[in-house]
Amino acid sequence: MRIATLLPLLAFAAALASNEGYATHFTDIGYPYGACGVSDSIVWGEAATDTVSGQGNPFYYVALNVFDDSGFYGTLTHPLKGADTVHMGTYRNGLNCGRWIKVRIGDWCTGNNGGEAGKAFCTPGTWISDSLDGASLDVVVLDQCTDGNAWCRDSKYHLDFHTAALGAFRKDGKPAPMASPSALPVGMNTNWTVASAFGNRKISWDFEAAPNYQGEPRFWFSVDSKPGYMRLIVTHLPNGIHLVEQLVNGTWTAARMEGDMGQMWILPDATGKTFQLRITDASDQLVLGGRTWSVTYPAKCGSNCGSAGTPADAVVGSGGIPAAVVSRASSDPRLRQEGRTIHLDAPDATEVDFVGLTGNVLGSSHARGGTASWTSPRSGLVVVRWRGTKGAGSLRWLVP
């Protein structure tokens, strides 16, 4: 009886276990789009909006492994099909695109951790803990890793971080960066200086719902979309994406994923310019309770879309359960400025971050029954984001 009771508990604990792997980093997802079909230009624009509203910042993105077959370093055509699916990695032919991950930093290697094919990680050397252990961050999947190194092949739960994400980790409510921008203001893919403390660390992670989700999915028409052929990019998802459907002659008809680019879909009927759509998420549930969207081809594209991603001219949602939309004022009586020093009057115990539009934390302060202050090193737009015993919020502030 005791063993029978213990086994289900062990199975339950295993189901809750984090995915464990190793971390690398890369500069950008490239042009015109990354492996999930989303461009850096789209990410850059969305980062400003989502940072201001306190949501998960898509500028902090990662790549997942296409392959999972330790010791295999060859090349395969993907999306993986038939017998080749034995090599399937956590990218899952694009089905994990657009999903959010909570990642935690673990130990670092005292020796070489170069990821050479066929070699054990951290050889020679040992894994040790330090003050960064336990630092965490929310990141979104926007790319894939197919490189022939040990990280992309032998570490099943390896994450390849957009380098900017390494600068945003936090521990115990305080910044714990492993990278910093080499210049201010930060550009879309400004060169970043990676700290030696990064060292391709151990990591553990779990999928999660999009942090502090607000609003609706966003729709973009990909480069080369045109009347008769529409490639739609879908971003800002509450829980990833497994399917896009278009209402065609009264019937919901599946769109086709472009290769294994999980956020780019070819519409089944592109004869018009306005399309009725719905989305299925990573749990195979209709997004926002079956909400539908009317999406209109952008007039600025004319006969052919030339940009990596052009936003739809009009997006009108109906039905389902729309997410909350929280508007943020551009000024507030609690905020004031002296020179380049910003003050936030915060009578309750509050942690305050001063954040750039890429989501990088520029500074932090703690106010207990008083005022949080920070001096900006430059002019420009800053997001003041706080959390305390009476809730959380964020405001934009222009430093002259």
Image (tube, rainbow, N blue to C red):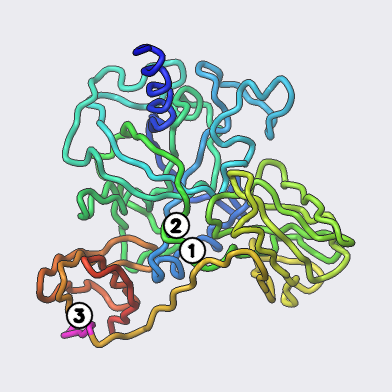
Q: Which residue is mark 1?
A: 44
Q: Residue at x 58, y 58 (%)?
A: 235
Look at label 3 and name its amino acid.
Arg
Look at label 2 and name its amino acid.
Phe
Sequence-first tag of 3 and 1: 1
Disc 3, SS: loop
Badge 1 crowding class, 10 Å Cα cut-off, few under 14, some 14 to 19, many 20 or more, is some
Residue 59 circle label: 2
Q: Nearer the viewer, mark 3 or mark 2?
A: 2
Q: Residue at x 78, y 50 (%)?
A: 254
Sequence-first tag of 3 and 2: 2
Q: Is residue 274 above or below residue 265?
A: below
Magenta run includes residue 152:
no
Q: Residue at x 61, y 23 (%)?
A: 87
The quarter in which the N terminus is drawn is top left
Which range of residues does the magenta coloring cover?
334-342
In this rendered view, identify the residue nearer to me: 190 or 16. Answer: 16
